[in-house]
Amino acid sequence: MKPICKNQNINKKPSAYIALVNKIYSESNKPQRYKGTMESMLREFFSKTSKYRYTWKRDTFKALLVHLYNQKCYALLRSYAEVEVLHNISAFGNRIYNDIEGWEASNVTKEEQISSLIKYCFAKYETPKFLEYCFYGSQKLYMLWYIQLGKGVSVKDLSQMPIKLTSKMAHEFRNAPDYYSVFKALRYAQAIGCGATKEAAKLIAFSSLSRTRDNEEVFWTTVVQFFSQIERLETNELDQIVDYLAYKYRENNSFSMKGRTFNALLNQTNDWHRTMYINREIENVLSWKSSGIKPLYKAEIIGGQTIVFKTIELCNSIELYDEGKAMQHCVAEYDEDCEIGDSRIFSLQSQAENEAPTRLATIEIALPSFEIVQAKAKYNQEPNKKTMMLIEDWIKSSNIKKVKKVIPNYEPIAHARAVERTEMNNFDFGATLIFRIILLILYLFLMFGRLLTSQPTIKPDIENYPFSIDMKHQLDSIFKEKYGVKPFKVE
C-alpha cells in the first residue's frame, strides 16, 4: 500500500486543492509515478485516464475529487490507497446510478467514507462486503460483480463466472464471511453446494484449491466434489494432495478423480512427495552408523492377537523424512545432529501379524550420555500411557536412561539450532540495516563536503569506523556471504 502523501495542508487553503485538480484535469498528462506529494499523486491517476477516449472516467474522477473536498473528506484525499479506490470507482463511472453530488459524508474515518460512497454509487441491493473490498485492489472483474449484484443481477449470471454455481452455491457465496477473498468465497460456496460441512468447506476455501488455474476449472471442480464427501479433512494433507493432483493432471490431462479413494490417494501423495524429496535432496542425504543401542522387542497378546512392540533406529535422512511425514513433525531436521554424533532417533512401533506397522512415538537419545531427551507422538503430542510404559521397559532392558529433565519439557538439539539460526538471521538483518544507514550518512556528508569545496567525491572509507573487532568479523562474514566483498580488513 502506498503511504499517505505529504503535501500542503489543503484544509488551510480552501481553493488551492480544487484549483490543482482543475489544472491537472485540463492538461495532457504524461505517465508518471507518485513521489509523495499531492500533485504527483493526482498527476499519476489522471495520467491513467484519457482526454479523448472513455472520457467519462476522467470526468467522474474529477467530480469525485471535487465533491469529496467540498464534503471535507481531507484525510481521504491525502491517502493514496483511498484515492486509488476513487480512481477504480471512476472506471465504472458510466454505471453509477446516483448523482455523485448527492452523497454526504456522515462517517468519521476515511475507510467508512469510502465504504459509504461505494454503496451510494453502485449498491441498490445488498452486496457482499468482501466484494466491496475489491475496490482496493486491481481486479476490475470483481468490482464489476459488485456493481452487477448491487443492481440486482443473480450470482449465477455474473460476467465471466469461472465456476458453474447451483442456487445453493449462489446463496452461500452471497453469505460468505467478510474476510474471505472472492475466490475463497467461491470455493467455500462450491464445497457446501457439493455436500461439505461448513468446517470442511472452510478448509477447502483456505487450501491451495483457491489458487488453481481458471483453464483447469473443470478438473478442479471434480476435486472439490471429491473432498466435499470426506468427513475429516486436515489442511496439511489437503494441500499436499492438491500439489500431487496438480502435478498428475498437468502431466496428463486425462487424469481424473473417478474411482479414487481418499486413503489410496493419500498414500500415492506421500509416495510422490517422498520421491520428490529424494530427487531434490539426493546430494544432501546424510547417513550414520548405528549407535549399538539394544532395541526394544516385546510381544503381547491383545484381544487374542499377537502384537509386537519394537524400536527401529533411523540411520539416514530418508528414514527421518519418512518418520516425520508419518508422524507430522520436524524430525527430518535432526539429520545433522545424528550425522555429527550428538543424537540418535528411534521409531517406536507396534505391529500385528500380517498388518502394516503403526508408529507410536519418535524418540531422541542424546550421545554419548545415552539419555532419552524427548519422545513425541503424532503431531508432536505427548505419548499415551501405554507408550510411556513401553519406553520404561526399553530403559530397563538396555543401556539407555531417562534424562534428568522431564521428557516433554526437554528442548531438543535441533530446536536449539533453529533458535540459533533465527537469532543469527535477525542479527544479519539488523547489522545490514545499521551498516547501510552508516554508509548513507557518510555519503551525504561527503556530498555536502564536495559542494563546499568543489572537490571530487571521495569513496567512503569505513575501515577506521569505531566498530568492535567482533562486530567487524560479523559484518565481514555477512557482506562476504551476501555481496562477495569484505568492508573491513580484520586479521
Image (cartoon, rainbow, N blue to C red):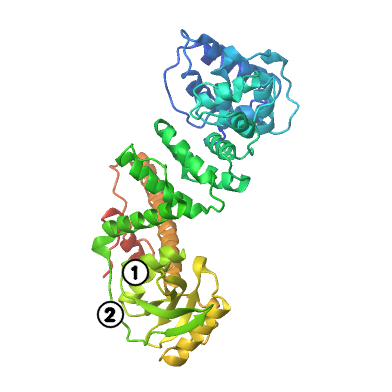
> Residue 96 versus residue 238: which sits nearer the camera?
238
Distance from Cα at disc 1 to Cα at disc 2: 13 Å
In the picture, the disc for residue 289 is: 2
> Three-letter amino acid code at disc 2?
Lys
Q: Residue furthest top?
A: 52
Disc 2 element: loop
Closer to the eye: label 1 or 2: 1
List the residue tagged with mark 1.
Answer: 319
Residue lying at 41% horizontally and 61% vertically, measured from the top left:
425
Task: Specify the label residue 179 is tagged with.
Answer: none
Instruction: Please tell me which of labels 1 and 2 falls first in the chain.
Output: 2
Task: Please say if 468 is above or below 278.
Answer: below
Q: Residue at x 56, y 38 (%)?
A: 194
Query: Quarter-wise, where is residue 70 in the image?
Result: top right
Secondary structure state at the residue bearing disc 1: helix
The residue sitting at 68% across, 26% down in the picture is: 11
**Identity, as a three-letter code, of the amino acid under mark 1:** Glu
Q: Compared with residue 31, is residue 339 higher up or lower down, i.e. above or below?
A: below
Q: Position of residue 119 (x, y in %)?
A: 67, 24
Q: Is residue 302 above or below residue 358?
A: below
